[in-house]
Image (cartoon, coloured by chain):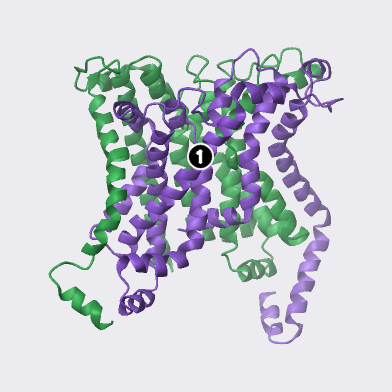
Chain colours: A green, B purple
Amino acid sequence: MSAPVVTRARRRWPAWLPYLPYLIPGAVLFVVVIGYPLLTNVYISLYSWRGGLAPLEWVGFGNYAELWQDSAFWTSFQNSVAMIIAMVVVPTLIGLVLAAVLFDYLGRRFGGRAAAVLRATYYVPQILPVAVAGVLWNWILNSQTGALNVILRGIGIENPPNWLGSTSTALPSVMLVLIWVQIGYPVVIFMAALQRVDPELYEAAELDGAGWWRRFGAITIPQIRPETFVVTLTCTVAALKVFGPIYVLTRGGPESSTLVPSYYSYLNFFDKSRVGYGAAVATVLTVVIILVAAVILSLQARAERREEVGH
Amino acid sequence: MAAVTETAAPTTAGPQGLRAARQDARYHRGVARWLVLAGAVVVALAMLAPFVIMVLNAVKSPAEYSQNGPLSLPSHLYLDGVLNFWDRVDFPVKLWNSFFISAVVAVVGTFISLLNAYAIGIGRIKGRLWIVMLFLLANMLPQEALIYPLFDMARQVGLSNSQWSVIIIFTVIQSAFGTYLLASVLGTFPPALLEAAALDGAGRWRILWNVVFPIVRPTLGVLMIFFFIWTWNEFFIPLVMLTTNDTQTIPIALASLQGDRMMDAPTTNAGSLISLLPALIFFLVFQRTLTRGVTAGAVK
């Protein structure tokens, strides 16, 4: 430690105080754009309000009580589970296998270039504005003029499904689009993670006669667990927040079959002019996201602890 | 088997033995590896199929589409779809709007992230763990929980339908993530460098720009690219805040044409194609930096 640092520490002020001004612009902006609106939104959720200059009418927890009885609200959260399956579960599982196949199998047999090209291909949907990709898919899946049904009629299927327009197929169709959008992300993260893993582990296992699936289960999965947690956390939060694809694909329809919480709150804010009610939906969604994130983070902490004990 | 390789390892035959074993495995899986490759390529084709269909039909006349379907090659280049979309949305204006908003957010957001992270990571401000948690939380919030108050505030200060409202909001949202990432990077900054600079009489402001900034510049570059692309791709907040044609961004312009009578197959596809191109070009230019950055974000 050098002399000036010591004398500075002996002053009455703590050493961090002179750094405080650097935080001020960020803190002010944070309070104005995040803190104040977030609290105001909770406040609004306790009122009945048509927005704009209309008067606010105190209803207490009335909006929340109404949510409890509102089947559309429950449907929207049920659909959130479907969004998590489409944006987290399926892409993570397929991503794990694809990343391992590219890295540990194809990469070694056909060279790193081939693996890199395939990886980049899987990643392309990730870099595009998701709303634009949604508009494209909306047209492909259109019942009358869409590419998919024109192809299906061309091969002799008389009445192809109205993919986005009927209650039985709309949700699965949206899920397929989201899987398509999402898959590249885990592949890229997991392949980067695999580069961390000591190749000797694989070689030793291979020499011991362990087949590909054995190595996948015994080495790949445990070694890249930290990344799996990061992917699970970020994608789950994204799945709970999903808005753009729903807006351009189905607008929550038909008959609420693809309604999600974020779209439901948007609908109440700007379409039904039920601002207090929309604010209540948004508040519940916020709480759910924080709870889910806390659960995932604590699971991760526990897994890390167990690993430390195990060693 | 393991014992054999262990004893063989010290001799020069070791690596060759290993290679022979691997070639042996290759020989055995001669067919299997082609099957696996075929599987991976099929997945890749499935990922690309929508784009191929889009490109084919962006330049195909409606008559030809209804006659030959979406998979046929266009017999001639039909550009009315592109022109229709270009004129209808006034594409150069939308392109500039998207670029302007994203660029300002990228630069200012990175700057704010650096200031915050300097105070947290190097200044070691009291309560920094809570501050970082708060920023991380801000990144997870659904935008719906902020939008109505923000919408109202913008109206009150005369920023309704203004790109500056969108710029301010995204600067804060992006820098929340940037602060979280940069604070952990700066937390491991070599103290010897800071002490040496302090000994030379440099103040905190000069240390930030002459010592810290040059060293974290690559990370700042990645952050800036990310902020740009994330803001470019944003949908919800611009949809609510930007209500007229002259302020809207590309994704909003395309989405707002949905259901319009002029949106026939070529126009829809040409519109999607033109709207995707800037992001695609940007990705190709910065591909290397980006994949490195995705990794950096994941390992924390």
Q: Quadrant of residue B41?
A: top right
Q: Is residue A232 left or right of residue B188?
A: right
Q: In terms of secondary structure, where does tag 1 sit? A: helix
Residue at left offset 46%, top offset 38% = A238
For disc 1, the marked residue is B100
Residue A8 position in % (x across, y down):
20, 74
Residue A63 position in % (x across, y down):
26, 20
Q: Residue furthest left?
A: A12
Q: Residue B100 or B284: which is nearer the viewer?
A: B100
Q: Chain of mark 1?
A: B
Q: Above or below — where is B210 with respect to A126?
A: below
Q: At label 1, which amino acid type do we have? A: Phe
Quarter of the rendering occupied by the C terminus of chain A: bottom left
State whether residue A202 appears in this view: yes
Q: Is residue A242 left or right of residue B19?
A: left
Q: Residue furthest right?
A: B75
Q: Is residue B35 left or right of residue B111?
A: right
Residue at left offset 34%, top offset 35% = A286
Q: Residue A247 or B237: which is nearer the viewer?
A: B237
Residue A305 position in % (x across, y down):
37, 61
